Amino acid sequence: MKDSILEKFFIGYISFAILGMLIITYWSTNITYNHLVETTASQLYSYATVASKNIADDCNYSLSDITDFEPYVEDFNKILNSEVWILGSDFNLKYSSDGSDLTSDSSKSIIISNFNPADYQNGGHYQISNMYNIFKTDMLHVVHPIKSGSSSPYGYMLVHVSTASIKSSSYTITKIFYLTYFIILLLSLIIFFNFVWFIYAPLKDIRTAAMQYAQGNFDFDPIKIYSDDEIGDVANSLNYMASQLRDSNEYQQKFISNISHDFRSPLTSIKGYIEAIMDGTIPPEMQNKYLGIVLSEANRLEHLTNGLRDLNVWSNKGPELILEDFDILELIHSSIETLEAVSSKKNIKLTIVNEAKKTIVTADKGKIEQVIYNLIDNAIKFSFNDSEIIIRLYNNRGKLFCVIKDNGIGISHDNINKIWQRFYKTDSSRGMDKTGSGIGLSIVKEIISAHNETIDVISTEGVGTEFIFSLSLAKK
């Protein structure tokens, strides 16, 4: 079973939550605790500096000159909730803020024999220990010498604070971190639900539709996503692709139907007439007539095959052009002369209206002749009897425009964009166009596009059709 993108996103979200919790638990807690230790030690050292100076100022030769140290250190207990010791130069404990009067009775004196002031010279003048096993738990110890100027120290002031209180403050701050983190997690759910609603759900619909289209079900309901963003663009593109493939499928079926019809009709005629000649149904004196019909049908098949071959070659790289300068009026006159017999049968008048000052163009003469012939031939086929076809030339913006306008059945609005398709015929019953192959306009479109020019069509049903194409004027 394939992994869901929603599952991956959810796993990522849970991983983010767990990782954040671990960072707060193991990283933020330690940073907070260490910061509080340094801050507390710095504060204690500042107070100890002031108190030590005051004591040193009141001493003459030693700490024995002072009978009561309480006034010097009472601020410690009031503000910092700490315990203060004062040691003599011999490391004898002379004062303890816990209430014991160790200075009045020398028998009760305590000598910190292992005390070494040098241990506190580095690292901010503090240590965390049990003070040579004097305390039952670790304490924060700050040491400051009591001396006047550059003389030897009279003694030392030691300030002790329980690390338990520092840890308690650290936990309090960490709880704030936890609360803030949980609030962030809750707010981040907005991102999660936005992902589900605006990305995952539309992608799921797109995936379902794409799988249906991949199976050839182009009639599957269009994707109903109307957001004006990348997801909406993908949905619209997929809907458009499906409609194009659906139309292409219909076009392919019509293509096969049309080409089968256009090949079957002449082949049936050829086969029928040859069989009739061979079995004697057609007498010898009539054979030339029907052989002419067979030749005409064979020419029709050849024309159709050549057209298909050209279109197949042009589909990849377009027709190969041999550009030259020539007068387009000559090609128009030549095409009219060729089609005069056909137009005479319907009593259609072919009129040239030349409004162009310049008619010399640069193009492939043979292929442009094919364009003009096809357009005039088409106009004759679909014009009413006793009507007129006008071929008009005019110049505009350095180009020559050729307009071929007929008075005939016209093309409906629904079909006008389909006329360039191969084998497409506007007369589905083939009542008016029994000889056309349905690829003439496709060839015309390919040739004009290869010249980097444009061809347009304007048509009104029951009134007529007008084709307009452009060509580049010759520079000389």
Image (spheres, grey):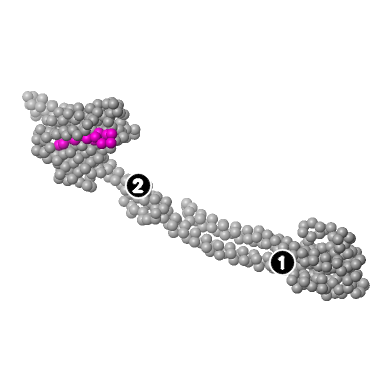
- Residue range (magenta): 389-402
Question: Which residue corresponds to mark 1?
Answer: 166
What is the residue that sits farthest to the right in this orientation?
A: 107
Residue at 81 percent of width and 59 percent of height: 120
Q: Residue at x 51, y 54 (%)?
A: 8
Tell me the quadrant of the picture where the C terminus can be found: top left
Residue 116's quadrant in the figure?
A: bottom right
The quadrant holding residue 42 is: bottom right
- Which numbered tag is attached to residue 241? 2
Q: Say which of 260 and 195 sits in front.
A: 195
> Residue flagged by tag 1: what amino acid is it?
Ile
If you read the primary sequence from the N terminus, does the residue marked by circle 1 or circle 2 appear first? Answer: 1
Observer-side mark, 1 or 2, equals 1
Quote the CA–CA distance across marks 1 and 2: 68 Å
Q: Main secondary structure of the magenta part?
A: strand
Residue 73 vs residue 429: left or right? right
